[in-house]
Amino acid sequence: MNILFITWDSDQTNYLENLFIPIFEGIQKKTSYRFQIMQFSWAAPQEVERLRLLVENAGIGYFHRVVSHQPNAALGSLWTLMRGSREIKKHLKKNEIACLMPRSTLPAWMVLRLGDWLKKRSISVVFDADGFPIQERVDFAGLSPKGFYHRWLRQVERRMVQNAQRVLTRSEKAIVFHQEHTGIQQREKFYPVINGRDPEIFKPNAAGRTAIRKELGIPESTCLWLYSGSLGPQYLVPEMLQLFWLGCQKNPDSRFLFLVRNTDFLKDKIPERLKKRVMVKTVPFECIPDYNAAADLGISLRKAAPSLSGLAPIKIGEYLLAGLPVLLSPGIGDLSDQLAAEPACFVYRANPGEFIDWLENTKKLAKADIRKLGERYFGLEQSVSSYIRALEKGSI
């Protein structure tokens, strides 16, 4: 069965290569499912070509469609959306596709416009409802819940959940949310899947740890805190740095490393007293596993918001697979509940003293045991298996 995965991205997103390509490649090795990707984005031509080579080397078809920004971003995007349904239809006529998998809201709208045409050809739809992107815009990007755009996005999401044969989520809490907002009570329509990482890539690595620490100019005895990922107000940078300052009172030689793409965001965020202790770097994705192996603590804090319950941050998996204890926020998908009782995880609820005590105790934990926890909740094999179960559940 050929499946067309449809996504709408900016010029900088890298989740396709980091997340979906390994998962789709793993599914293809185990089943007769074959994936193609149609990506709508405004990435530069050289970036598109780089991604094309990565996707095709994994045995997956790749088709890029340019998102116009002319005469401006809003009108250009609207024009691309209108044209996008025709592009998808044209692709389906030329290729034997049995299933469409739109990821998130804008691809969902393009697919919804083909509803009757798809039904006549028995082309099924699996909606990858990855997180709560609409609620995230309300929580962190200023989208008015009373505005037209919000109402339109919600309507698209609701219609796609109602019309799709299967809905993929990242948490059980997300399933409850979609049931409450659509009135659909058939639990069998929804299926939680896992965001997975390859344990052969993210793992404890003594040689890599030594090399990175030498590069950073810190000895083995230094406690290295690590934050890897996106930046923005929702990621609680001031709170991270305040906790780090408390940690420095206990371990004065501690250091904090930010691995981020948007380094400008941190320019005025680091207090003078911490500037000699905090490092900020941007590195290629393939280098991140060695930096993880060099650290002693992974951080995944998020501002409390309704959208958190739909998430499963992959960085938590990267940390755990590397044998790092993890500091995380409550309310993140199902993970804060699943991991709260684990010695390697601390769910932070404004209790800094308890956190510092926990951090001291993590020195006794074996990296191998932490890694097993990461494999259980974030292993690539588990992720591939969860997708296969979702796709094979009933008929699509």
Image (cartoon, helix red, strand yellow):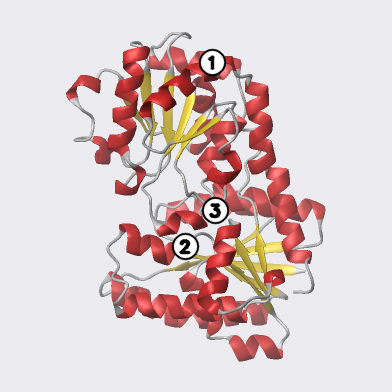
Q: Based on the displayed image, in which of its 4 quarters is residue 42 positioned?
A: bottom left
Q: Residues within 10 Å of mark 2 (few under 14, many from 20)?
A: many
Label 2 vs label 3, nearer the camera:
2
Distance (Cα) linking label 2 and label 3: 18 Å
The residue that label 3 is drawn on is: 16
Q: Secondary structure at mark 3?
A: helix
* Residue at x 50%, y 59% (from the top left corner): 131
Q: Secondary structure at mark 2?
A: loop
Q: Tell me how many marks there are.
A: 3
> For the residue marked with disc 1, what is the amino acid?
Lys
The residue that label 1 is drawn on is: 363
> For the residue marked with disc 2, what is the amino acid?
Phe
Q: Are marks 3 and 1 in contact (CB under 8 Å)?
A: no
* Residue at x 42%, y 41% (from the top left corner): 229
The residue that label 2 is drawn on is: 132
Marks 2 and 1, the one that precedes in the sequence: 2
Q: Nearer the viewer, residue 319 or 327?
A: 327
Marks 3 and 1, the one that precedes in the sequence: 3
Distance (Cα) linking label 3 and label 1: 35 Å
* Residue at x 62%, y 51% (from the top left corner): 21
Q: Secondary structure at mark 1?
A: helix
Spot occupied by residue 166 in the image (x, y as percentages of width and height): 67, 71
Judge from the rendering whether residue 106 lies leftward or rightward of residue 70; answer left or right: right
Spot occupied by residue 209 in the image (x, y as percentages of width and height): 53, 17
Judge from the rendering whether residue 231 lies leftward or rightward of residue 125; answer left or right: left
